[in-house]
Image (spheres, helix red, strand yellow):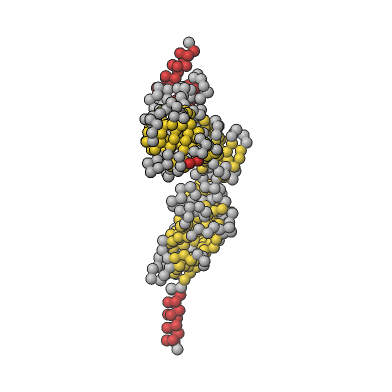
Amino acid sequence: MKKVLSLLTVALLAMTAWADTTVTIDFTAQGYQGGDQVHELTIDDVTVTFDKGTNTNNPPAFYTGGNAIRLYPGNTMTVSAKTNIKKIDFTFGTSDNTNDILCDVGSYNKAGKQWTIGSSDPSAAVVFSVAGTSGHRRIQKLDVTIEDAEPVTELVAPVFNPNGGEFTGSLAVTLTCATPNAQIWYWEGTADEQGEWHYYNGPIYVTETTTYTAVSMKGSDMSEYVTATFTLVEPTVEAPVFTPASCSFNDRLEVTLACATAGAKIYYSLDNELWSEYASAIPVTDDITIWAKAVVGAIESETVSATYTKNPSATVDVTFDPTQDFGTGDGTRHSFTVVKEPVTMFVGDGMIHGSGQYRIYSSDSSALVFTSTGAPIVKIEFNGVSSYTASNLSKAEGNEGTWTTGGTDGVWEGNATTVAFNVNKQVRCTSIIVTVAGSEPSILLGDVNRDGAVNITDVTLLSAYLLNNAEDMPAEADVNGDDDVNITDLTLLIAMVLNADE
């Protein structure tokens, strides 16, 4: 009977040695504040490490919305332990999205919200990531099942988590000891500055720069001291970035704003007084300055601005008149070309009729092509003839822009150096007007503030640009026209202003 009991005892001890332990990592119980970035957390030999991964804009962070850590596409979450991990059960926060969860080993069951790995493929670590290009997963709790390790018999020092470092707002600090049934005691200060001892029975909430020292105790034994310093830093918010930066434009511009600080709200103003929350691209159609700032809670970034200047519209009309512009046409059907700088019109099958018409025929060799050797073509107007209207034309394949017809006329609008048409039936036109974009508007060198005059104000502004190593200076600042703005331009501008005053 004793032998049977001994065998049973050995069997039970063997089973106990290989039993599993489930460690609960509850992110809602760590004292995180809304917007806190989360990096690493260790509880009972299980460590969860977060990283922004390939997502450069949104690192993992805790938010009270959903009461969970938000893991964005491209972020990673690594779960590691001192022994093999057998399964991980996920608990998600409210309003969780549906992005797929990926893992580098094992498999994740979306319906069961559980990760598992086969016994033939043990692993002490698994890296999770979130699929997709938008959205996020709200991870509230992890139940990590691991194989039990052999118990630690010697008394070891406690471990701080995190082990010191900088923090913002408040921080929950935990202490663990690998020795079973050991007590942990701690105090504020270094090992040489022993203050009042406190028995550790839960997280220490740190709200200011503090140094803590801790020891483990079991019976009459005491471990070595361990010390960690936690430094409070003032949170900052990055200023928004304009895309594009200050510049000039032709007709219309879409301005977008972005902030590198996770969770920041962006506000913009058109007068630096009335502010609106930024939601989508801001359309710009005239001269304007836009101010912007980013806000997280009660913390604001610096206010930045960008100025956009509309270029004067300038176009050139080129009129093809059959009574004057014959090209190589001689009254018989054939291909011909008419050149009126900077536009060339090619007709594959047509003629110049004596009644003052371009006649363009539909045949195997038919073609109608307009080419600009200079600025892009932005409009082509066909003045057609009854029964042979411009509606018999259509845009050739691959041509952009819009084509509309009405009555006898037709209008193409777009932006291209070559515009081709299909000739579906005969077309007759009394004239064809091609509009090309004008050249870049001329600038007044030295007029740095673009107020139409060169004076001491421009000298002051250019000096400020150079002192601050500004990157996006207006073209007017390049006074000597050498494509480089430096002290030489400032010297020349001062001379221009002094000479103008004499």
Where in the figure is residue 245, as x and y percent of width and height?
48, 35
Dividing the picture into quadrants, the one containing residue 494 is: top left
- Up-down relation of residue 254 to residue 132 (above or below): above
Farthest-out residue, top:
502
Dividing the picture into quadrants, the one containing residue 201 is: bottom right
Horizontal side of residue 144 vs 95, given as left or right: left
- Up-down relation of residue 414 to residue 448 (above or below): below
As rendered, which of 251 and 497 lies closer to the eye?
Answer: 251
Residue at 46% of width from left, 32% of height from top? 357
Where in the figure is residue 306, as x and y percent of width and height?
52, 34
Residue 390 visible to an observer of this rendering = no
Residue at 43% of width from left, 37% of height from top? 360
Residue at 46% of width from left, 38% of height from top? 427
Horizontal side of residue 296 vs 442, given as left or right: right
Residue at 47% of width from left, 57% of height from top? 130
Farthest-out residue, bottom:
1
Image quadrant where one finds the N terminus: bottom left
- Up-down relation of residue 335 to residue 15 (above or below): above
Residue 100 visible to an observer of this rendering = yes
As rendered, which of 439 and 344 lies closer to the eye?
Answer: 344
As rendered, which of 92 and 18 lies closer to the eye?
Answer: 92
Where in the figure is residue 287, as x and y percent of width and height?
54, 30
User: How many numbered discs?
Assistant: 0
